[in-house]
Image: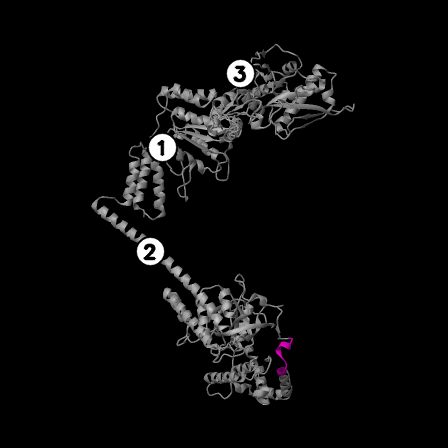
Amino acid sequence: MRFMTAVNFKVLPVFRQRMTNVRSFCRNHWPGNEELPVRAQFEKIKLHEYHGTFAKSIHSRRQTAAIVCLRSFATKRYNDKDSSNNNEDDIGDPASLPATVVVPEVWPHVPVIAINRNPVFPRFIKLIELSNPILIDLIRRKVKLNQPYVGIFLKKTEENEAEIVQNLDDIYPVGTFAQIHEVQDLGNRLRLVVMAHRRIKIVGQILEELPKPQDDPVSGGKASRRSLIRKKTENKIPELVQKIEEVNTSENKIIEGAQEKVEEKVNLSTDSTAQTGNPQALLMVEVVNITHEKFRQTEEIKNYNKALTQELIKTIRDIISMNPLYRESLQQMLHQGQRVVDNPVYLSDLGAALTGADAQELQQVLEEMDISKRLRLSLALLKKEYELSKLQQKIGREVEEKVKQQHRKYILHEQLKVIKKELGLEKDDKDAIGEKYRERIREKTVPKAVMDVLEEELNKLNFLESHSSEFNVTRNYLDWLTSMPWGVTSPENLNLQQAIEILDKDHYGMEDIKKRILEFIAVSQLKGSTQGKILCFHGPPGVGKTSIAKSISRALNREYFRFSVGGMTDVAEIKGHRRTYVGAMPGKIIQCLKKTKTENPLVLIDEVDKIGKGHQGDPASALLEMLDPEQNANFLDHYLDVPVDLSKVLFICTANVIDTIPEPLRDRMEMIDMSGYVAEEKLAIAKQYLVPQAMNDSGLTNQQITINDNALHLLIKSYCRESGVRSLQKHIEKVTRKVAFKVVKKETEKVDVTEHNLQDFVGKPVFTHDRMYEITPPGVVMGLAWTAMGGSTLFIETRVRKPSTGKKSEGTLEFTGHLGDVMKESIHIAMTVARNFMSQQDPSNTFLIDSHLHLHVPEGATPKDGPSAGITIAIALISLAKNQSIRQNVAMTGELSLMGRVLPVGGIKEKTIAAKRVGVNCVILPEENKKDYNDLPKYITDGLEVHFASTFEDVYRICFAPQQESDTIRHEKSLTFDISQPQSAPLLGKSTD
């Protein structure tokens, strides 16, 4: 039994009123029955127990014993086996809640309902829905005990969505005391309609152990709703009499215990004392009522409060007049016949509840106890809401005015269309669109298959709604289809002399490419018609592959279009998307034809060797159809889905290496090699193109800067040894920029750049030595190699790893230098050939058989592979075995077979340029590469002694003899100009590849 902290006799009138309600309830439900039902007596016991009045102050001892007996009887009503639908006890029925006529003035212990967003003000009703089973069980128990009261408190953080908080710090201490008016039990949820009555404040937490909620598997988690069978009281009279007699013997103990508990205070109890700590979830709290601060009611304060009240009422009226939604909210908040003008307390709460302010601001109004301050806070919130309403109304008016104007404009346009259509001045939108597309193709030679598709799509367009998505798809398709240059070609230049002038003006050298383009023009002139070709320019970066293609388009008077396929992984970039996709577009070649507006443009496909391959298809395979002369006359794009003639298009592809180009694609192209430039070509390019362009870009004239040939020669030799001229162009631009800076600062009026002051502009030389060994020792031989950047020298070093032990065991060979698998195989072949050759030349020399050797290729960070170093490795091993240096200034290249044959290799031009660049005057090449050497320009072969070898024995005689006369081509050393590293470069200074 729970008692109040002190005897409060103000509760007695309330209790009497409660008992009157219980008696009235019983008379209405059981008329004519002298005995109160067990349910009614039990409600009476609960009311008596809650209000803390002890038995001695109300009833006699016999009445107390009867009450205790009835309580014992009432606790067994849930175990009845019988069922009755007429007496079902269900708290989900609002009628099961006994109506409380008078709300108790003091109710110290209430359940906690923590809410988010907005607090509940006194005299306002709120709908609350609970889903936590522990809280639902607690509310059900309180309602059954006829204690339908809760405390509603606001959470401090809105992110906390839990219905049960863990400690007092999670909620604000000031809330409202609310009465549950209606309960709707939904099983796993509980819906409450509560009305707040007054402000309360938390003083502590009540620790109360609740039984865990049990779900009914039959009813789906709802509380047990078994009917409470009230059996006839005459059947229970003997049992009641017996219980009364048993209680009479212990009534004195009960009363004495009750008196002792009345004298004790609840806060000293250990079972249900209010605790400030929070070891459990916060379910029950002890609260006290909050009273408003008392103040001296002077005339000034009255006038001030009256002014605040009137201003607050005026602001509420303004808000209501501005937005009718507030009127409905206010009507729901006010009770019928309620006058709030004379009640500043309720008026301040009403003003705050009417606004959409933040939860913290509303909580501040709820916690404010001074009436004047609360009115000011509410008035501030209402003013802010009023300004927000005015802004909202202004925005609404602007939007409405804009919509009206657009609607009016639309109506006028529609009326104008109808008027023009009636007068015959204008056609319908669909007719106008169809007429526009027909006008586009009127002067074009459209194939019959394309014309059939076009007519079909135009007829389809007339039946589609203009606002449908299919209409826009069809319209875009027709736009692409009619924009194609059907039968439109640009007049081609067939004048050879004019083409030669254009090509020579833009580029220096490149005789192979120029000759091929002139042949194309000559064939077109003889046939009287042009035909497309597929060319592929391959060479190192910077040799002008891209720029020469643009010059070719000028020479042929063709439209120019370029797109790169480097890194492309989507086949739709070539052949387009399907029309069913959102945002579908045709492929690059269709976009090219639409942009150039001709059927015979020059299309440059850049970086074809770097094309990718992904899960969206293989673009290289898509290029096969486009670049095949036998198929591209009927090229089918996925988007257009009609055949397009590409046979008149001149395709030019560019690549750095041809090994990565797929073989079927390489087979469809005519390959033209563009190797690197020698120093003479670089010097001519710099003088004719790079220097004038750099001076023009820097704003300099010939009166302000001069760069002599010796400075350019030093720049090429010591700074720019790549195959192309891109690096040379950057260095020349660097010189001109520094000269422009000096001229602007008025340090000088003219600068002469020579080999002596070149370092002042470009810094220290990058390359100081031409080769690693000026004099090659035994076991070291210079080879020639080809890379994607051009040709270079490659030294082979051999050395004894450890001396022979004298035991009869075969020696070993270790090799290093980041070598590839093919080069490793070449080392093994060269070792076998060298051993056999030494056994024939000098049988007593078993050095290569017994010794443990180490072979190394310098510059280990650079990967090396290929068979062309075979004869170089074998000569290096023999030189080490003989302990004799080979002939100086000799470089060689060639693949070596196991039988000692010297096989042909590639990159003869690049390797020859590399040998001449480092000052080598004797080169050994395979016999079968003689034709490649004969094709080289004279300025490359001048001053070189070249030997062609067919067997390894020929190489041996050349390397270990001062001169060889058989099978030798000699050239007088007419020019000793150094050659830069053969990395191809463009001849046009203003555009490099």
Q: Within the magenta stretch, is there residue 667?
A: no
Mark 2 or mark 3, earlier in chain? 2
Inspect the image, locate mark 2, and give the three-letter code of the amino acid beneath it. Glu
The tag on residue 939 is: 3
- Residue at the left extreme? 423
Q: Is residue 663 left or right of residue 519?
A: right
548 is higher (above) or lower (below) than 6: above
Give the number of the mark in front: 3 or 1: 3
Q: Within the magenta stretch, is there residue 266?
A: yes
Q: Secondary structure at mark 1?
A: loop
Looking at the picture, how far across and down is residue 913, in whole percent?
A: 56, 20
Inspect the image, locate mark 3, and give the three-letter code of the amino acid beneath it. Tyr
Looking at the picture, how far across and down is residue 518, in whole percent?
A: 42, 20
Q: Quadrant of the N terminus?
A: bottom right
Mark pair 1, 2: CA separation: 46 Å
Find disc 2 in the rendering and name its residue: 401
Mark 1 or mark 2, earlier in chain? 2
Magenta residues, start to end: 261-270
Find disc 1 in the rendering and name its residue: 597
Q: Nearer the viewer, residue 797 or 380?
A: 380
